[in-house]
Image: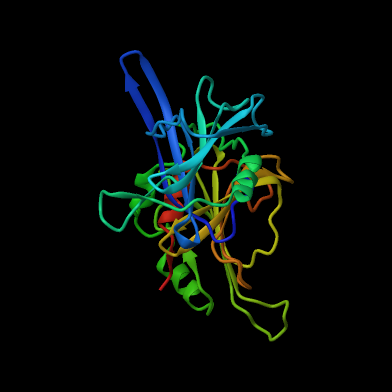
Amino acid sequence: MLYIPKGFRLIKLESGKEELRSGSYAYYSLLYKGENDACFDISLNTDPAMLTSRMPRRFTQIPISNKEVTIVYGNVEDKPITMGRFEVTNGVPNSAYMLRTGGPIPSEEAGRNIRCNSVSEAEYDKILQALKVMDFGENTSANNSLNQNAIASNPRNSDNLLSAEQKEQLSQLEIEVILPTYLPTGTKLASFKAYKKKTLQIADYSFYNIQYIGTDNTCLEAGSGYQTMWQNNPSKIQIDTKIGVIEVSSGTHSRSGTLQHWGWIRKNMEGQSLITGGLFSTKKPCNPINFEEYNKVLQSLEVLK
C-alpha cells in the first residue's frame, strides 16, 4: 500500500490458514484507524458478512489487477459503507481481496465490534489505486506474514546480547537509546558503536549503532543518527507499538539489491531506526529476517533506562 490518509495508523493485524475438508485457504486482514472514528481495512479471503445484491455498485480499474474492481456502496444500519472486491494479477491465485471502509472496528468493550465511519469516496479511490503487492521475502507468506499474537505479546530474550559495560556506554550518550528486548533465535552481536558528542559543532553529535547477525546471512541494525534511507520504490505501512507508531518502509536496497525493511522509530534529529536487510557494517549484502519476526522485534522495543 503506497498511500495511507494522513492521521491513519495500523491498529489490528490478523492472518492464518483455514483448514476445510475440501482443502485450505490463507487469509489476512489489516485494519487502519484515523480521526473521527474513521477506518478502512484491506484483506484476503475475508467474508464481508452482509448481503450486497441490492446495493448500488460501480466499476473501476486498478494497476494490480487485470480485471475490473466491483465496488458496492450505500448505507447499512444507517451508516455508509464501501467495499471493493477484486483479484490480483500477482497475488494469491483464485482468491478474493477486499478494500473496505465503514466496516467493523473493535470497541472499548472487550469482545465487541462497532461500525466505524467511512473515508470519503476520493480518499477511498486514492487508497485503492495505490495498492501494491508486497514482497516480504522467501521466508514469509500470506500464512505467516503478520499475526495478532506478535502485536499483543512482548517477547524477551535476556539482555539484547549487550554487556553491562556496553549498556553503561549507551547510558552516557545523553540521547534516547531504543533497543529490542527480543531477537530471533540464533542471533549474535556483530558490531557495537557508541559515540558521545565532544564539541559544540553541528556536525558533531552523539549516536549509537548496534548490528546483529543471524542465520541464513540475516541482519538487524538498531541505531540513531539516520537521515537518509536508500531504497528503491518503497512500500510503507504504519505499525503501532508500545513506544509509538513506527513507519516501516519495505523495498530493494539501492546499493546491495536485497530486500530491506526499514522502521523509522523516531523521525527527529537523532533519527532512530530498526533495519533488517541491506548491508552489514562490512558493506557486504545481508538478508532481512521474515516480517513476522521483524514485527516481534518492533513490538519488543524499549527505551534504555
Nearer-the-camera pick, 304 or 86: 86
**Left or right: where 88 falls relative to 52:** right
Q: Foreground residue, 142 or 49?
A: 49
Quarter of image, res 241: bottom left
Screen quadrant of the N terminus: top right
Front one among 19 and 174: 19
Where does residue 252 sit, x and y in percent of width and height? 68, 42
Q: Is 203 or 25 nearer to us in this picture?
A: 25
| In the image, farthest residue toward the bottom | 200
Q: Quadrant of the C terminus?
A: bottom left
- Where does residue 65 sit, x and y in percent of width and height? 64, 28
Relative side of 54 to 129, left or right = left
Residue 294 seen: yes
Q: Residue at x 45, y 31 (%)?
A: 52
* Residue 265 x %, y %: 54, 62
Question: Among all residues in the image, which is located at the extreme top?
Answer: 22
Q: Position of residue 97 (x, y in %)?
A: 52, 31
Q: Is residue 179 visible?
A: no
